[in-house]
Amino acid sequence: MNQPRIEEWAGRAFATLLASCALFSIILALFSLLAPQQLDYEEGNILNAGLRIAQGLTPYPDPHGWPIVLNPYGPVPYLATAGLIKLFGLGFTAPRVLTVLAALAISAILTILLRHWGHSWPVGIGFGAMFLCTPVAVHWLPVLRVDMMGLALALAGLSVVALAPKWWSLAVLLFVAALFVKWSLLAAPAACALHLIAKRQWKQLGQMAVVGIVLALAGFLAMQAWSTGHFAFHIFGTHPDPFGPFDYVAAVARLLRAQAFLAVLALIAFVRDVRRDGSSLSSFYLLTSLFGAATIGKSGSNTNHLLELTAALCLSGGLGWGVVAGWLRAKHKAALSALALAGVTAASLASFTFRLPSKPSDGCEQAYAFLRAQGDRVLAENVGALLLAGKPVLLSNPFVFTQLVAYKGWSDAPLRDRLRAQQFDAVLLATPLKLYMLNERWPPGVLKQIEMSYHPAARFSCYEAGVAFLPNQTPSAAPGGRADSSAEQGWAKKPVGGR
């Protein structure tokens, strides 16, 4: 069999295996997104913001008012969630589908870019599908978060610059839309700016910058008007939590170790570009996404902050494979090329993390039954549980509230006063009081006041809803949980409703 034939069959096998892996990831995500309970802390906060919009309210009210509402993301995902609530009712499934669709769009854009930059369709499909097989993407696929949506918009803008630079105004619109999903998604527009600077295309750079600033300013002013002046604080003032540079370095190092084969291929592409003229858009994007991942160093950040870097690695890794394949082709090493591509396939599949679909938990059903049996004044960090139980959200995003208290001088006295006066019919926490880390989800004074004014009344095996508290003046258990009259002796008991 001649060399082109071997490469063709190897590429088809690569594309088939990686596309099958991606399809399996999507199937697993589809099972998980049907789960009625909250799967991630931020899901409830996003759903609550969408519900507020559906009810004719702004998601960015006065942060010092009551109830306390804190929404740190842009309006695009909140508006999309509101539209889905109006169409399908209050629930997590429909908004989660947007995450899956955005992930599919990311994979498709990577494939198109790789094809545009010289790859065959099979190899482009393989490296594009590889994104959906990475552990980071697999974990966040079925979760209602803003990152996939924002990344899809940013990559769409990048692809317009690469494929149809005359349509630069569309690219700018997509970049601005991405920023109004999550304002830290600057890697793609920054890469395009560096690319234009390297090419000395000053006119296009100036045009894009002016239009981008005008669109962003118009959107900002519109949001300020909608929120009666509070939008700026919600977006820029809700991140006082400390930054740990070593946490950032450690997180990126873990990603590069887990995807070592992609990192090596991306490095090959980067070195090849530097040896040429150093102006490759993909290389600039790899660098800017590496810096953009620095947000994972913020307290409370998770691996969703590595999604863009993962996509950039898939893109540059695919280009790096083109360098390797071209060198082997020049050496007439068709069999070795097929073997090397088989190694890339095996490494990618080996890094795939099998994540069992989330199923409805009996413990969550009991927790929601408990909430429904209480009055409307409930304090909980599981905002999704409140929404699904039909309760108003009196404090959204307690993590952000705690950071504002700890690092920006906010007072938690109004919340402590309400707890002291036992104005809440119940308090629902994720874990027993003694397991909370300092300034993690609740200020220490708030936890102390809960301990003084409330008693643990029921336990549940449910994410973010493990312990229910009732006011000390009514020490009785509600339906769905088990009574616990001793705050000191009850912490060691196994959660009720677990399997």
Image (cartoon, rainbow, N blue to C red):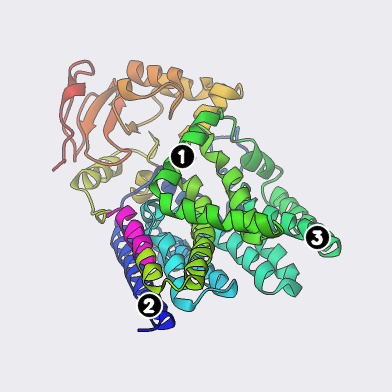
Query: What's the residue type where badge 2 is placed?
Result: Arg
- 444 or 194, which is in the foreground? 194
Q: Is residue 74 magenta?
A: no
Query: What's the residue type where badge 1 is placed?
Result: Ala
Toward the left, the furthest residue is 499
- 401 or 453, which is in the foreground? 401
User: Residue 205, which numbered label?
Assistant: 3
Query: What's the residue type where badge 3 is placed?
Result: Leu
Quadrant assignment, res 406: top right
Q: Residues within 10 Å of mark 3 (few under 14, many from 20)?
A: some
- 335 or 400, which is in the foreground? 335
Asked if the residue at tag 1 contacts the one at tag 3, i.e. Cβ–Cβ closer than 8 Å, the answer is: no
Question: Of helix, strand and loop, which one carries label 3?
Answer: helix
First in residue order: circle 3 vs circle 2: 2
Q: Which residues are magenta?
A: 341-354
Locate residue 22, reporting x and y percent: 36, 66
Q: Residue at x 65, y 39 (%)?
A: 236
First in residue order: circle 2 vs circle 1: 2
- Left or right of 172? Residue 305 is left
Distance Cα–Cα, label 3 vs label 1: 33 Å
Locate residue 403, reporting x and y percent: 53, 28
Residue 180 visible in image: no
User: Residue 253, which numbered label?
Assistant: 1
User: Residue 12, which numbered label?
Assistant: 2
Choose mark 3 or mark 2, whichever is in front.
2
Distance Cα–Cα, label 2 vs label 1: 32 Å
What secondary structure do most residues of the magenta stretch adopt? helix
**Whether residue 54 is situated above or below residue 499 in the rendered picture:** below
